[in-house]
Image (spheres, grey):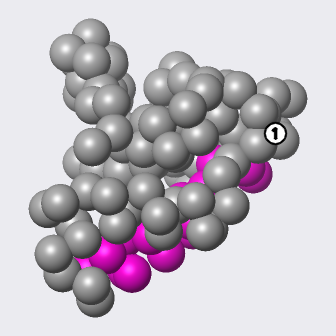
Amino acid sequence: MASPLSESELVELEATLLPALERHHLRLLAHSLRSLQAIAGRREGDLPPLAAIEAWVQQQPAIAADPDFATAFANQLHTAGDQLMGIAEHRGCSALALELHDLTIWAQAQADARLR
């Protein structure tokens, strides 16, 4: 499977002052980013195409055993990729170059905007 978030990244994520639901969304985005980086085999540049995501999902034994879940998971990674591209554009980098810190800054700005 994808490279998991490191212990320090999990600590950083949990240390945010974001509400629980927003921390959960941030955690999902971070895990999606790591999965997409693993699929692409790099931490810079463009996101892998849907076909590459689907092929990777089929190589994961725990996921491939359930075709409906595999399809849904591939689609969710692709959708998360779209959101990551938007964040990357705003941050001035490629989607695969994003780090947890970038995602945290984005999530905090989103929360702040909702409070205004």
Q: Residue at x 28, y 88 (%)?
A: 68
Instruction: Give the answer, above or below, for where 112 lies relative to 56.
Output: above
Image location of residue 9, percent across then percent down: 32, 19
Q: Amino acid at mark 1?
A: His
Instruction: Give the answer, above or below, for where 56 lies relative to 12.
Output: below
Label 1 Cα neighbours within 10 Å, binned few <14 / some 14-19 / many ≥20:
few
Q: Residue at x 60, y 27 (%)?
A: 42
**Nearest the eye: 51 or 96:** 51
Image location of residue 114, percent across then percent down: 57, 56
**Nearest the eye: 76 or 66:** 66
Q: Residue at x 52, y 61 (%)?
A: 53
Q: Is residue 112 left or right of residue 66?
A: right
- Splitting the image into 4 quarters, where does residue 43 fall? top right
Q: Residue at x 26, y 57 (%)?
A: 60
**Nearest the eye: 80 or 37:** 37
Instruction: Give the answer, above or below, for where 85 lies relative to 76.
Output: above
Q: Which residue is mark 1?
A: 90
Badge count = 1
Residue 25 seen by the camera: no
- Splitting the image into 4 quarters, where does residue 99 fall? top right
